[in-house]
Image: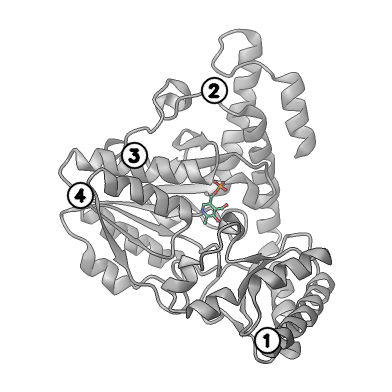
């Protein structure tokens, strides 16, 4: 991947919008990468994929683009949950400032949205439904089976609304296809699959076009996203997408789930008082959300960091905020439990031995801190 990015910068430094030979070479790289991203997404046509500066931009482009187009048709309600990623929450804040009404659907103790509440809330006024396909803190999937997501998508569409899925955490970690999910817009990001940071994509169903408008005006990306494309980043995304596709085909998620299972088993062996969130529902194979009552997550992180073990409190995306995670709050965790919850995530290259060694370090640090907490 790194080599492909370097070559792109050295050999295809033309602007993909230019008509000369250098532009042509850059355009060819752009379309190869777009095809690879589309293949991983399971899209029918690479032209349905528009490249963005990351997951955040893809999400905001989907949410605000649909909201503004639907508002023009007199629809004012957006359905979502309080367990969404900050990128979605911020986009919804903007929509509210522009006159939208957001209905917050409840999530259960495993961060799953309640399907019955969602169906009951759908109406002729619903502009958009925006949900996580995989939660970034617990790994919880929107549904056990893609068919359940597809059924939901059809109901949302039948109500005249649009379904947007934030699949940033899911892409490259579990196999899925936008065709099978039947969603209308799907946001993804390269860095979750070992691609470069600052590059992502939004998949738009061709029929969603009339219910969406661009956020950044300009001729690039077929008039859907203005601004010269980040070609080296997109090339890196394309290569990472191909690598992820091969890993998924080689049963990678099962191997990763075994690494996580070894980690969780060792944690519970060493810390029988620990709680692991969302284990009873379908979740991503790489994520483990641990509640360690009496252990301050921030102190645990700092202690482990000094030993070279990198984990996060809540999710890495909001790690610099001290406020308790809205996801854990929405799941009904007390403020105290939320402050004692850490997220551990595993990469494709980690082994069972790595996971067990990490669990031993976490357990030792947690025992040290729990003791100190009860002492004071
Ligand atoms: N959505 C989810 C679920 C995420 O975990 C993240 C974090 O990376 C984002 C959106 C934002 O993506 P990006 O960092 O590419 O802007």
Q: Quadrant of residue 372?
A: bottom right
Q: Residue at x 46, y 50 (%)?
A: 87
Residue where numbered disc 4 is placed: 76
Residue where numbered disc 1 is placed: 376
Q: Is mark 2 within 8 Å of ligand 1?
A: no
- Nearer the camera: disc 1 or disc 2: 1
Residue 184 appearing in the image: no
Say few, some or many: other residues with alpha carbon within 10 Å of mark 3 (under 14 / 14 to 19 / 20 or more).
Answer: some
Nearer to us in this view, 164 or 289: 289
Q: Earlier in the sequence, mark 3 or mark 2?
A: 3
Q: Earlier in the sequence, mark 3 or mark 1?
A: 3
Rounded to the nearest angstrom, the CA distance separating label 4 from label 2 is: 33 Å
SS type, badge 1: loop
Q: Earlier in the sequence, mark 3 or mark 4?
A: 3
Give left or right: position of 331 versus 321: left
Say few, some or many: other residues with alpha carbon within 10 Å of mark 1 (under 14 / 14 to 19 / 20 or more).
Answer: few
Say few, some or many: other residues with alpha carbon within 10 Å of mark 2 (under 14 / 14 to 19 / 20 or more).
Answer: few
Q: Earlier in the sequence, mark 1 or mark 2?
A: 2
Tags 1 and 4 touching, CB below 8 Å: no
Q: Earlier in the sequence, mark 4 or mark 2?
A: 4
Tags 4 and 2 touching, CB below 8 Å: no
Residue where numbered disc 2 is placed: 228
Query: Which disc is residue 65 wearing?
Result: 3
Tags 3 and 2 touching, CB below 8 Å: no
Rounded to the nearest angstrom, the CA distance separating label 1 from label 2 is: 56 Å
């Amino acid at each position: 991947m790194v080599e492909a990015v370097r070559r792109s910068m050295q050999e295809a430094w033309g602007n993909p919008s230019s008509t000369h030979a250098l532009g042509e070479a850059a355009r060819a790289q752009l379309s190869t990468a777009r095809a690879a991203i589309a293949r991983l997404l399971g899209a029918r046509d690479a032209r349905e994929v528009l490249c963005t500066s990351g997951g955040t931009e893809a999400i905001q482009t989907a949410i605000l683009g649909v909201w503004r187009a639907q508002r023009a048709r007199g629809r004012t309600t957006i359905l979502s949950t309080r367990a969404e990623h900050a990128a979605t929450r911020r986009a919804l804040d903007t929509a509210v400032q522009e006159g939208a009404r957001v209905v917050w659907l409840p999530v259960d103790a495993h961060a799953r949205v309640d399907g019955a509440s969602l169906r009951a809330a759908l109406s002729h006024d619903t502009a958009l439904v925006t949900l996580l396909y995989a939660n970034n803190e617990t790994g919880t999937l929107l549904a056990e089976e893609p068919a359940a997501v597809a059924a939901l998508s059809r109901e949302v569409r039948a109500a005249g609304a649009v379904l947007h899925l934030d699949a940033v955490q899911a892409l490259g970690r579990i196999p899925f296809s936008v065709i099978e999910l039947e969603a209308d817009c799907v946001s993804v990001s390269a860095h979750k699959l070992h691609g470069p940071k600052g590059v992502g994509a939004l998949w738009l169903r061709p029929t969603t076009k009339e219910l969406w408008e661009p956020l950044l005006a300009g001729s690039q990306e077929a008039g859907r996203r203005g601004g010269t494309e980040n070609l080296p980043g997109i090339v890196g995304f394309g290569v990472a997408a191909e690598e992820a596709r091969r890993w998924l085909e080689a049963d990678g998620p099962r191997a990763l789930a075994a690494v996580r299972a070894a980690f969780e088993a060792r944690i519970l062996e060493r810390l029988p008082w620990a709680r692991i969130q969302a284990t009873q529902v379908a979740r991503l194979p790489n994520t483990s959300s641990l509640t360690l009552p009496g252990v301050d997550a921030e102190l645990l992180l700092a202690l482990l960091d000094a030993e070279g073990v990198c984990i996060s409190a809540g999710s890495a995306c909001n790690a610099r905020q001290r406020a308790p995670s809205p996801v854990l709050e929405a799941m009904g965790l007390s403020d105290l439990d939320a402050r004692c919850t850490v997220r551990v995530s595993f990469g494709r290259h980690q082994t069972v031995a790595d996971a067990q060694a990490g669990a031993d370090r976490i357990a030792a640090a947690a025992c040290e801190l729990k003791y100190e907490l009860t002492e004071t």
